[in-house]
């Protein structure tokens, strides 16, 4: 990162010296001493050179093999004191140093050390973790914007970086213009630098963000253990900004919110009780976003709307309030309607609620020679509804039929469910098979139910009921039209009769008046 941005960043941030005796700082100082020795060529360090590649030069790099050899030679890594080989131990130590950002590969976002010709570069002291960097999301957004503005292959965003940029753009929509202007200013400063210097600074800045915003799946070495947060000696420590831009929207963790912002003092009993209450309240909160909950409710409502008589017209219509006889025809045939058959495809729960759905699913399982799962599930459901005096005997019958050694309809249970069920049967009750029933239900839902929906049994039943329902619908529509026609003719006849009656009455009155 450029010197101008450093000066600007240092003006816009408040720095506080960290505790020199903290565990992290002790580790940082030891690693920095090793890094300084590696870079000191006069004292036997690794030679930093410029490597020529096709049509370009790569300045200030060393190979991974050179670093491994130096670590083995200068840190007394010997076979006698190690469980692993010296090479493996040196690679492991070098990878730990790289994970903290002190050295990095020039062409990879994953910070590890390899014992081969992979080229590495040392990080500038300005970006060392001992400077207590806690960069904010606005700094990361400026950095990603800078990368997109420079049309170079080496600065092209990775997939996860492009996703992070889109997420940050949504989060900082109101101040995105300001972030974009900051990125433009940084790009203008970069263009004034020498090409080789710009390459080095770009790679060092990228490595800095690979440490603080690592690749998904990599360990974040800057993450603070919650127990260390509780023991933090300097609660007035202020986050340092890389570009001097503060992120007002970024909130602290629940632990920091509960800690006092005043000068450090020993927490009282009341403070601890408040913190415990706050953390318990955070545990009770669900992790689902309200938008996801609303989408789920809306999709459920839309799916079941056609089955709600208050929300839509259900077919066939109620024969008690209409002249449609389709309902009686369907009841006489004992065959489910298309709406019922279609509902079985929503979930296994809906299929098992409907007696016809259970029968169809059982028929399918019998064709696959796996009906014992559903029969066990139905037997446990029946056990829950049995009178208490019959529960123990029925529970033993289920065990002998499905779970005992050499059972005629043995089911496949995992060892945990089997042991728990056998323990429950020492004192049998209605819910002794609860865990086993849940296991079998999940097994049917994930395996057999999906095949049932694709089977010919379900598809043929769905298509056959669709044709019959279409016929019933057209018949009921024709019946409705005939009824409306008869009512129309009846109304016309009544109107004609009334008009004739009125005319005859008028003529009679006229005759009587003339005769008088």
Image (tube, rainbow, N blue to C red):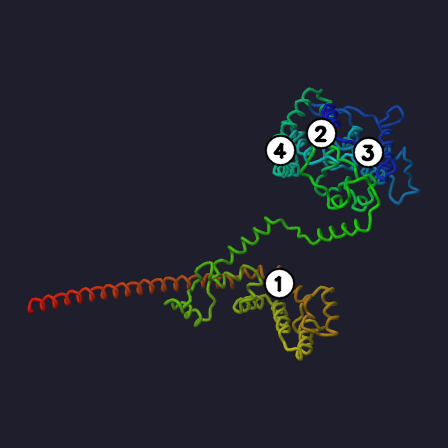
Name the image quarter holding the C terminus: bottom left
Query: Measured from the top left, where is residue 134 in percent x and y?
Result: 75, 36
Mark 4 = which residue? 175
Disc 1 or disc 4, which is closer to the eye?
4
Question: Looking at the image, do the residues carrying marks 2 and 3 touch, with CB atoms under 8 Å apart?
Answer: no
Residue 251 falls in which quadrant of the image? Answer: top right
Relative to 418, say whether 29 is above or below: above
Relative to 12, say whether 274 is above or below: below
Mark 3 = which residue? 130
Q: Find numbered disc 4 in the image and state the secondary structure of the residue it sits on.
A: loop
Tell me the tag on residue 466.
none
Mark 1 = which residue? 444
Q: Find numbered disc 2 in the image and state the secondary structure of the residue it sits on.
A: loop
Q: CA distance from mark 2 to mark 3?
A: 19 Å
Q: Earlier in the sequence, mark 3 or mark 1?
A: 3
Q: CA distance from mark 1 to mark 4?
A: 52 Å
Disc 3 or disc 1, which is closer to the eye?
3
Residue 435 falls in which quadrant of the image? Answer: bottom right
Q: Earlier in the sequence, mark 2 or mark 3?
A: 3
Work out whether residue 102 can be spotted.
Answer: no
Query: Measured from the top left, where is residue 132 in percent x and y?
Result: 79, 34
């Amino acid at each position: 990162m450029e010197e101008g941005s450093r000066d600007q960043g240092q003006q816009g941030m408040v720095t506080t010296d960290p505790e020199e005796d903290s565990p992290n700082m002790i580790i940082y100082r030891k690693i920095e001493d090793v890094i300084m020795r590696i870079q000191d060529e006069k004292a036997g360090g690794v030679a930093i050179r410029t490597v020529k590649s096709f049509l370009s030069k790569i300045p200030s790099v060393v190979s991974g093999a050179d670093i491994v050899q130096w670590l083995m030679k200068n840190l007394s890594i010997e076979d006698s004191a190690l469980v692993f080989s010296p090479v493996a131990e040196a690679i492991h130590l070098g990878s730990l140093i790289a994970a903290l950002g002190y050295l990095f590969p020039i062409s990879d976002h994953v910070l590890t050390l390899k014992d081969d010709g992979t080229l590495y570069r040392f990080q500038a002291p300005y970006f060392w973790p001992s400077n207590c960097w806690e960069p904010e999301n606005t700094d990361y957004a400026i950095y990603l914007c800078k990368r997109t503005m420079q049309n170079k292959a080496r600065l092209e965003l990775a997939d996860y970086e492009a996703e992070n940029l889109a997420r940050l753009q949504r989060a900082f929509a109101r101040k995105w213009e300001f972030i974009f202007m900051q990125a433009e200013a940084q790009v203008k400063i970069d263009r004034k630098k020498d090409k080789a210097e710009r390459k080095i600074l770009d790679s060092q800045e990228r490595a800095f963000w690979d440490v603080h915003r690592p690749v998904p799946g990599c360990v974040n070495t800057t993450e603070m253990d919650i127990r260390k947060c509780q023991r933090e000696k300097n609660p007035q420590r202020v986050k340092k900004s890389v570009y001097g831009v503060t992120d007002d929207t970024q909130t602290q963790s629940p632990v920091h919110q509960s800690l006092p912002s005043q000068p450090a003092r020993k927490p009282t009993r009341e403070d601890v009780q408040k913190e415990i209450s706050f953390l318990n309240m955070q545990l009770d909160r669900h992790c689902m976003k309200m938008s996801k909950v609303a989408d789920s409710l809306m999709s459920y409502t839309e799916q079941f709307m056609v089955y709600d008589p208050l929300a839509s017209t259900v077919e066939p219509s109620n024969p008690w309030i209409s002249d449609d006889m389709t309902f009686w025809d369907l009841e006489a045939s004992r065959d489910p309607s298309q709406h019922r058959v279609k509902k079985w495809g929503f979930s296994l729960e809906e299929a098992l609620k409907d007696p016809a759905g259970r029968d169809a699913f059982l028929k399918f399982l019998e064709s696959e020679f796996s009906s014992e799962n559903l029969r066990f599930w139905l037997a446990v459901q029946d056990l829950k509804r049995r009178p208490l005096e019959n529960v123990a005997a029925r529970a033993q019958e289920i065990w002998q039929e499905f779970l005992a050694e050499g059972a005629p309809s043995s089911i496949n249970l995992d060892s945990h469910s089997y042991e728990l069920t056998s323990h429950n049967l020492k004192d049998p009750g209605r819910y002794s098979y609860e865990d086993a029933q849940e296991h079998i239900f999940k097994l049917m839902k994930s395996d057999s139910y999906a095949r049932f929906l694709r089977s010919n049994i379900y598809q043929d039943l769905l298509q056959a009921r669709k044709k019959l329902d279409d016929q019933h619908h057209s018949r009921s529509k024709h019946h409705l039209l005939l009824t409306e026609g008869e009512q129309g003719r009846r109304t016309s006849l009544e109107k004609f009769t009334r008009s004739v009656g009125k005319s005859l009455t008028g003529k009679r009155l006229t005759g009587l008046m003339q005769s008088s």
